[in-house]
Each structure stands twice: as structure tokens, then as C-alpha cells.
Image: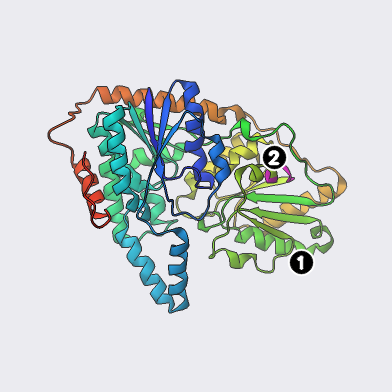
Amino acid sequence: MRVVIVSYAFPPVGGAGVQRMLKLAKYLPSAGVTPTILSVDNASVPLRDETLSSDIPAAVEVIRARTLEPGYAAKQRAWSAAADGRRSARSAVIGIAKRLLVPDPQVLWLPAASRALARRLRAAHDDVVLVSGPPFSQFALAPIARHFGAAVVLDYRDEWTTLSGGIYEMAGASRSASAALESLLLRSQDAITTATAAFRDGLLARFSFLSPERVVAIENGYDPADFPQELPTPPDDRLVVTYVGTVFRLTRAAGLLAAVRQVHARHPELAARLEVRFVGRIVDTEAPFFDGVPGVVRTGYVDHSEAVMEQARCHLALCLLADVPGAERIYPAKIFETMALRKPCLALCPTGALAKLVKAHRVGDVIHPDDVSAIARFLVERLVAHENGTLQTESAPIDVERFDRRRQARAFAEVMDLARENCRNRARPRTGRVSSAWTTSRRWAHHYRSPGRSSPRP
């Protein structure tokens, strides 16, 4: 079986969202599936990690298509220039962009991506096309795959319209258009995969036309090959608490940082032994919460292998999830590496999927992210245990092997088989009249094409 994996988030793009499709491409061949990747050539993203490319098997073909987006640095300069003027000017610029670029700025990748996918399918006749979002504008490529007779799998690494409307603050009119578009494009699928069971439940509740047997939850996970045999150990002279990942609205650290201030104010001698490390990008809106907090180290973004080492060197791994609408259905991908490293975890999260996962697999402790007093008490208890030499530095999670990326590749292969069977069972003319979703996809590509270029042809 041959599959084309469409993913904007793919090396050299960095960040946690890259891992799911990267590891799938790495391990699908062992499950009897030959993958080809379609990704962006000039990604407009804040993070790059060239080291991740070493995980792409030499035999896997990677097709690149250019996006019409400006470079990320240019985006930042535009926001900064607007911010230097009146705040309302910056808001106006952002508002216009949100209304025009539906459902996301990566819609500007569609013209080249649609041409590249059509060329590939016309020449190679791949069995399956798997499209992984976000960005969810990529889902508009599904009708193209269907037109060429390929089975379509849509992969939800995150939610689309639910999170776009809350966590990512999509404008109201754009949110309505995005919801309608999601409903339309979901009719082009032969199977759906989701990163959490809660995502699956949400889709089935919102879209009554979906068949439950076609929607399969496949969690994120860990790759045993990412962990060298010799891992560093935590230091003896201080208690190291480490968070690995981006700090933004969904993973804000305000409650934790307030608790750290409280510990320093009330227990200065103990607090002198506390080091809280943030390994990753901190967005501008969250940076002020860090100002003046003692004992906090910010490393910035590091490559994935170094991020693993940072987790190995800590006594306690942090997992952050803010109490915002939709967060109850999420668990951050880093939790699985924490489990594999057998690091005790402090999950600062609301009641929901992450809290349930941490408790069910005995990964660590759960505290609400806004309960500053409870977080402070927890830190003091761990500092006292560290000082007395009684601190537990290794956890004993259960059923960790379930999240091995190799097992997940086999699960994806089974879903692809299901999609291929569903594809065979539906009428799929290769020529003649095409679906409304295909027509919408072509119109999008035409609307966002660069000047002087023709729209993509099937």
C-alpha cells in the first residue's frame, strides 16, 4: 500500500506538532506501507529544527511546494510596526488577516500544494492520502485526492473550529465560515484519526453524518530511539522542575510562577534550592508573567534531542494546560516522553483528558493551574523531601508501551486499510461531474494563487 502524507508541519519545521507525522513516516514502512510526504518548501513558522530531518528514512520521498505566505520574520516586523503605532492599528491589521485567511494563513499554501498533489496522484496512483491538521486549510486537498480515486484519511492532531474559536480567537464571521467548511470537507473522508478520544467524541457529537466506525483515536506517543542508553541524572544540590514546550495562552504558566514567588517569600531558605526551567519558546503575551520571578531559567527553543536531555536532568517534569474552553479534551504530546523517561509529573491542568491520563497511568500528580496555594504547598513538600534525601525521582507508570510510536504506526496502517476499503465501496468516478467539495477546493486555490499563474488543474 502506498500513502501520500500531507503535512505542513514537517522537518525542518520544529515544535511538538511535527513529531506525529515524522514518526509515522519513519515507522510506516515496517507496517507494510510506503509513504511519500507532501510538505511546504518555505514554511512561515517561528521554530525550525534541522536535526529532525535525520529521522526521515532515506527511502521516503519528500515533495516540497512553496507557500505564498510572507516569511515569519516579515510577519513579526509587520506586527511590531503596527504595535509601535496605535494599538488599534495593530488590532485592525490582525483582524483583517483573520477575516481574509480562512481557516488559517496556510491557506496560501493551497495553490502550489494542490498542483503538487494532483501531479503526484496522476503519475503514481497512490492508494491513500492522509492529511494532518493543523493547519486545517490542508483538508481542502481531500477532494483532490478523492477525485483521483485515492482513499482519504483526515488526521486531527488538534481540534479545528472548537479551538479556533476559543484558544486561537478566530473572528466571529471567520469562525462561522470555518465551521461550514469543516462540515463540507469532512464529507470527503474515508476515515478520520484523532489525537485524543475526546476529540473523537466531539466530532461525532457535532457531525451526525459521521460513522463512528470511521473515526479512530490514535494518541501521540514516544519513540524509544529518541532516548540514548546513557541518560543524564538530576543534580544533588537543587530541586530541578522542568517544563518543555511552548508557553502560550493554552499552556500559560501564570499560576505556577505566582506559586514560585510565594515559596520564595515564605520559605526563602528552601526556595534557594529550587530551579524551575522553561525549555522552549515563550510568546510575547506570556513573557511579562516571568518578570522578576526568582529561580526561573528560560533556555529558549532547543532541538528535540536536547529537549529530551533536559527532561532527563530534572527531578520533576511539568505539564501545563490552562483552564480555557476546549482544554479539557487535550493532552500535550510531551506527556508521553515524560512517561517513557519515568519522570514524576506535575500536571497543572483542569479536569479533563490530561488529568484522566495522568491518574489512569500513574504518571504523577494533578493540581488545577490556578490553585496557587496548592501548587506552592506541593513545591514545598518536594523541597523538604529533596533536602531530607527522600524525594522520589522515578515514577512507575503503567501501560506505557501502548504509546510506542511503532505501535501507533501499525494502528495508522490499519486505519488506512479501512479507508481503502471504504473508498472501494463508494462510487468514485475519475472523470465527469465532480463534488461540491472539489469545486470549493479549486476555487480556493484559484483565489489565493499568485499573480500571473493559472489555477491548478485536476
Residue nearest the observer in this picture, 393 or 146 = 146
Residue marked by disc 2: 343
Q: Is residue 106 magenta?
A: no
> Looking at the image, which residue is at 25% across and 58% down?
451
Residue at 46% x, 36% y is 197
Q: Residue furthest front?
A: 452
Q: Is residue 147 above or below residue 13?
A: above
Residue 400 versus residue 441 in the image, above or below: above
How many labels, in total? 2
Q: Which residue is mark 1?
A: 265
Q: Mark 1 is on which residue type?
A: Ala
Element under label 2?
A: loop
Q: Please check the rendered image and state whether residue 313 is part of the magenta-colored stretch, yes or no.
A: yes
Q: Nearer the viewer, residue 304 or 282?
A: 304
Screen quadrant of the C terminus: top left
Q: Give percent across and percent down for residue 87.
A: 44, 76
Residue 106 lies, in percent from the top left, at: 37, 52
Residue farthest toward the bottom in the current orientation of the protein: 86
Quarter of the rendering containing residue 232: top right
Name the residue located 50 percent from the left edge and 43 percent from the top edge.
11
Location of residue 226 with respect to 298 vertically, above or below: above
Residue 35 placement: quadrant: top left
The stretch in magenta equals 310-315
Q: Residue at x 56, y 53 (%)?
A: 246
Crowd rating for badge 2 (residues with CA inside 10 Å; few <14, some 14–19, many 20+): many
The scheme the figure's colours follow is rainbow
299 above or below 397? below
**CB within 8 Å, label 2 to label 1:** no
